[in-house]
Amino acid sequence: MPILKLNPMPKQFIDPYGRVLSYLRLSVTDRCNFRCYYCMPEEGVNFVDRKQLLSYEELEFLLDVFAEYGVNKVRITGGEPFVRRGLVDFLSRISQLKGLSEIAITSNGSLSFAQIDALADMGIRSINISLDSLDKKRFFEITRRDKFDEVYASIMYMIGKGFEVKLNAVIADGKNTQDILPFIELTKHHPVSVRFLEEMPFNGTGTFEVPTWNHVVIKGHILNHYPTMQRLTSEKSSTSVNYQIPGYQGTFGIIASYSRTFCGTCNRLRLSATGELRTCLYGAPALNLRDLLRSGASRDEVVRELILAVAKKEKDGFEAEAIQAQTPKKSMSFLGG
């Protein structure tokens, strides 16, 4: 009688609600060469000492662990990731890691053509650019840096090189609502995806007002000008509801980042540059992997702590936020988004 060989159960991080966590947002630095108002104050930013950052060797070890347990996509974030020395070499090494099928990057777009070429050579072609205005003056007012021409040139260069480019625009009353329609017109002639985001309470100042331009208002504004806009089919775990104007090359989407309408299908984990693991952006750190590693923990011990952390993941961002309601929210540059 033939012996049946059963396939072993895949190693996965599964939260209490049955969600498989297969996507890691990894911040490599809290530093940034811009000072966007919704991310950090213009002055007085207390960046962490570089010795407190996870080393590239520690990051590679942790990514190998995450990949073993089913994390197949990693997004490299900051701060601005390209301000950290050695990033391109690090990306080249992790691009060889078994199990990672996609490496994506979020940047402010101030990277050089040489860095873009290096990304293309190693097969990394998915990049999100934080761009909140197509107007040079408003860009300066939002970022507090005169870098629009440089950023726009990089975007066009990446599009020309065949990158999958997504532009993330945080929409706020009195800041850039007049940029929504020009962004949509940008998709007419360029195969780019624009996503309009609600503002979130992670500006590092401790003050925040509920956004008046939420996902409903943004959609209504667009629909008034583009009544033929068509909704697209998106992945189950997508945070954006995506649309396209018939005949346009690109697409656009709306992300309810403050309203948090997408929590039910969340598949994300977040790791800060200092090792803080968050199972929800709005929640407190579940554990510190840097401290765990530097205390001499074995690989099995790291895995055990990760499984325990995932097992405590909250149902949604509102529940996570309520648990740490009295704790000041950190800057987005530290959290990594």
Image (cartoon, rainbow, N blue to C red):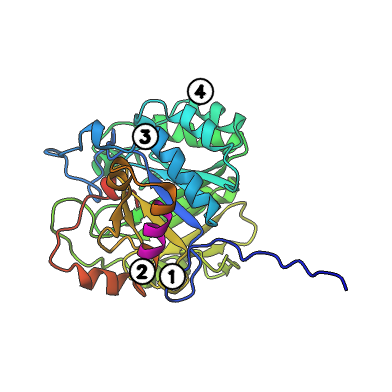
Residue 236 counted in the magenta span:
no
The x, y position of residue 85, in whole percent, is 37, 26
Position above or below: 181 against 298:
below
| Residue 79: quarter of image | top left
Report whether residue 31 is seen: yes
Q: Nearer the viewer, mark 2 or mark 4?
A: 2
**Cα separation between marks 2 and 1:** 6 Å
Q: Image check: 73 left or right of 106?
A: right
Q: Which residue is mark 4?
A: 114
**Cα separation between marks 2 and 4:** 40 Å
Report whether residue 128 is seen: no
**Cα separation between marks 3 and 4:** 19 Å
Structural crowding at the residue carrying mark 3, measured as other residues with C-alpha within 10 Å and reported as few (<14), some (14–19) or many (≥20): many
Position above or below: 187 against 22:
above
Q: Amino acid type of disc 4?
A: Ala
**Cα separation between marks 3 and 1:** 41 Å
Q: Which residue is mark 3?
A: 148
Residue 304 counted in the magenta span:
yes
Sequence-wise first label, 2 or 4: 4
